[in-house]
Amino acid sequence: MMNNENDIIKCLQNGDTDALRHLMELHQDYVFTIAYRIVKNREKAEEVTQDVFVKVYRNINAYQGRGKFRTWLYTIVYRTALNALNKKYPGKNENFEEINPCSPINMDSQAHVFTVNNNFDTSRILWQAIDKLPMMQGLAISLFYLNQFNIDEISEILKIPANTVKTHLHRGRKNLKYILLTKYSEEELI
Amino acid sequence: MKHLSIEDIEIYLADGKNAHKNIIRHIQHCDVCKKAVDEQLSVHLFLKKIKPMHASNNLFEKTAARLQKQPEAFFIDSLFVPAFVLLVILALFFFIKTPKKINPLPIDRQINIETGYSQKNNSYEKITYYINTFSKSFYYMGKRYSNEMIISALVILIFFFYSALDNYVKRKLL
C-alpha cells in the first residue's frame, strides 16, 4: 500500500494508474477547493480537477524532485483553472480592494455547494465568507491556511512577489473580519 | 515611533512566539500596532479551523475515463504510421537516381577491360551492384506507373494530414 507521497510519485513515473488513485485520495479535495476559488462553479471546478490530474499523470516525469511536489502540483492547478476562465495572470492588475462593510451580503446564497459533514459549520461559514473576497486574496488565504504553504511557496505558485502575498493575506483577513462580523459576533466565531 | 509594517505583522502571525524579539517587544509597547495585530489575530485563529470542500466521490473514475479517451501520443495514431511508411516507399520511386550503367553479367564473371582479368569477388562491388539493380527497378516501375503512383501518394498524404488534424483537434477539445 502506498502511503508515502514519494512512493506514489515513483509509481506514477512507472505508469502505474493505481498510484493515481492514491494521489487523488490525498489531494483531490484540496485541489478541488483551490480550483473552486478561481472558477466559482462546482461543475467547472471538478472538470479542472480532472484536467489537473490528467496533466500530472502525463507529465509526471517533468517533476524532477527540485522543490516540493505540492508546489509543482498547485502551480498546475492555478494555471489550469485560469485557462478554464481564459485569463492570464490576474494578480498583476488586481487592486488591493477592501470590502464595503455596509454593502448587503447574502451569506446563505451558496449553501447548496457545500456537503454536510461533521463539524463542517465553521468551514462552511469561512468558505461562504471567502467567496466574497477578491480572487487573489481568497487564493492567498486558501493556500496559506488550507494547504499550509508558506509565503515563498505561495509566491512561486501565484507568480507574484512575496510582499504582494503578504499584502493579500493582510487585506484578506481584514475583509474577512468585516464580512463575518456582519452576521456573527466575535464570541460566536472563536 | 515607527510602527510595524504589514510584512512585520505577517511574520509575527506566521512565527508567533518565535518571531523576532524586536517585533514582540514593539507589539507589547505600542497600542497602535497591538490593535493592528489583534485585528488580524482573531481571524487568523479562526482560519486555522478551515477544512477543504468535498469533491465528488467518483472523480477518479471520471479522470481515468478521460485518460483513456485522450490520444496517448501523436505518433501512435493508427493512420499515421502506415501512411508515413508508404510515403517513404513512394519517395524511393521518384528520388533515387538511375544508375548510369548496369553490367549484364554477374559481378564475379565480369572482365576488367584494361587488365583482361575477371574482377575479384569483392563485397563492395557486390553491394553497389545490388543497389544499382534495386534502384533501377524502382525507377522503371515509377516511370511506367507514374500516374498511379502520383494518385496513391496524394491519397496517402490526404489521409496523413487528416489523421494529424483529427488528433490535434481531439487533444484541444479534451
Image (cartoon, grey):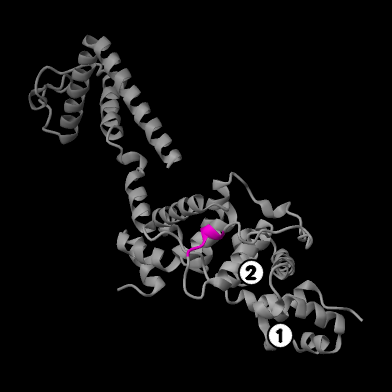
Please name which of the two marks, 1 or 2, marks the residue nearer to the observer: 1
> Does A114 appear in magenta?
yes
Element at label 2: helix
Residue B159 visible, this orientation:
yes
Q: Amino acid at mark 1?
A: Ala
Instruction: Give A77 or B157, whichever is nearer the viewer.
Output: A77
Element at label 1: loop
Chain for disc number 2: A
Q: Residue at x 79, y 87 (%)?
A: B22
Give the image location of residue A81, x and y in percent.
55, 52
Chain for disc number 1: B
Q: Residue at x 69, y 89 (%)?
A: B17
Instruction: Give A144 or B35, whichever is nearer the viewer.
Output: B35
Part of the protein shown in magenta: A111-115
Q: Residue at x 62, y 46 (%)?
A: A87
Label 1: few (<14), some (14–19) or many (≥20) C-alpha neighbours in 10 Å? some
Give the image location of residue B174, x and y in percent.
42, 42
Structural distance between the alpha carbons of marks 1 and 2: 17 Å
Instruction: Give A175 or A93, whichever is nearer the viewer.
Output: A175
A110 to the left or right of B134: right
Q: Amino acid at mark 2?
A: Asp
For disc 2, the marked residue is A152
B174 to the left or right of A18: right
For disc 1, the marked residue is B19
Q: Compared to B158, does A132 lie above or below?
A: below
Give the image location of residue B1, x and y in percent.
92, 81
Give the image location of residue B37, x and y in percent.
77, 79
Q: Compared to B68, does B142 lie above or below?
A: above
Q: Which mark is residue B11?
A: none
Residue A66 visible, this orientation:
no
Image-quadrant location for residue A5: bottom left
